Amino acid sequence: MTMVTVNGVQLAYEIHGTGEIPLVMVHGSWLSRRTWDPMVPQLAKSFRVLTYDRRGHGESERSSAQGSVREDVDDLAALIEHLGLAPTWVAGQSFGGSITLRLASERPELLRGIIAHEPPLFALVAGDPAVAPMLEGFAQLIAAVSERIAAGDHAGAAEQFIEEGLGPGLWTQLPPELRQVMVENAPTYLDEAKDPDQLAFDPKWITGFPHPVFLTQGDQSPPVFPPVITKLTDALPSAEVGSISGAGHVVHAEQPEDYAEAITDFIRRHTT
């Protein structure tokens, strides 16, 4: 693990493999770079893989000020530039996928292509009456989880988020080390929940992105994510959509080998 200072905060990162093609992995909310560990050995056979802890997660520095998704995007861009990885592939899961898509809209010159698994860009489907009850339920869940974090019940908040947001019984199926990471990162999730731009995205931002895009979803995931993927493909007609069998939202823990294979296959097919 190495530390680097970008945009005034220290970020922890690791580089795996010696391949010519760089691949940056962006983890989602609650998590850390360690959540990619089940996939890294397989990916590192083909790529030079960068995993890092987003600010406020894992071993990276946590700012005392209110954070924002824009800071995460700026951090990712600065890290890519600092390490000389551009142009690179970037893959993000959940909120990491949101960050990846925002980077694609703002700094396409840094990228060879992007891969995003179920980004929670719920602003895209806010006007869909079929999705409205699910969004309302999710908003209520975030409010309840945030209240528990603020009260100091980090473990209870993490478990409630997984059980009610992603599926009953999933919490106990997650590896103990992953559950512990989530508990430790609960304060940063509370910070994210207070960011008014957390779930926002305008499809116009991404229209015209000139590089390959791979949008993935799990066939066991909550039904709120496919409508988001549909809205993204409306803005990106050339994007490929893939389904990971037997996986839900936490794809890197549920089907790491299949997800790594899907990423590897997509990049190989789009590498000249």
Image: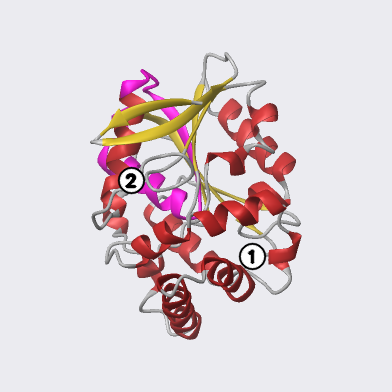
Return the x and y of residue 179 as percentages of the image width and height. 63, 57
Closer to the camera: disc 1 or disc 2? 2
Inter-mark Cα distance, 1 to 2: 25 Å
The kind of secondary structure element at disc 1 is loop
Q: Position of residue 123 (x, y in %)?
A: 35, 69
Residue 8 against residue 97 in the figure, above or below: above
| Residue 166 painted magenta | no
Residue at (60% x, 76% y) in the render: 164
Give the side of residue 193 with respect to residue 180, left or right: left
Dot 1 amino acid type = Ser
Labelled disc at residue 72 = 2
Disc 1 crowd, CA 10 A, few/some/many (<14, 14-19, 20+) = many
Which is nearer the N-term, disc 1 or disc 2? 2
Image position of 156 with respect to 191: above or below = below
The residue at the far front in this view is 152
Q: What residue do we see at 35% from left, 26% from top?
A: 4
Q: Judge by depth and name the residue closer to the eye, 144 or 81.
A: 144
Query: As displayed, is residue 239 above or below residue 231?
Result: above
Q: Position of residue 190 (x, y in %)?
A: 39, 65
Residue hosting label 1: 221
Q: Is residue 106 left or right of residue 116?
A: left
Q: Which mark is residue 192?
A: none
Q: Give the residue type at disc 2.
A: Asp
Segment colored magenta? 82-110
Q: Position of residue 198 (x, y in %)?
A: 34, 62
Q: Residue at x 65, y 36 (%)?
A: 37
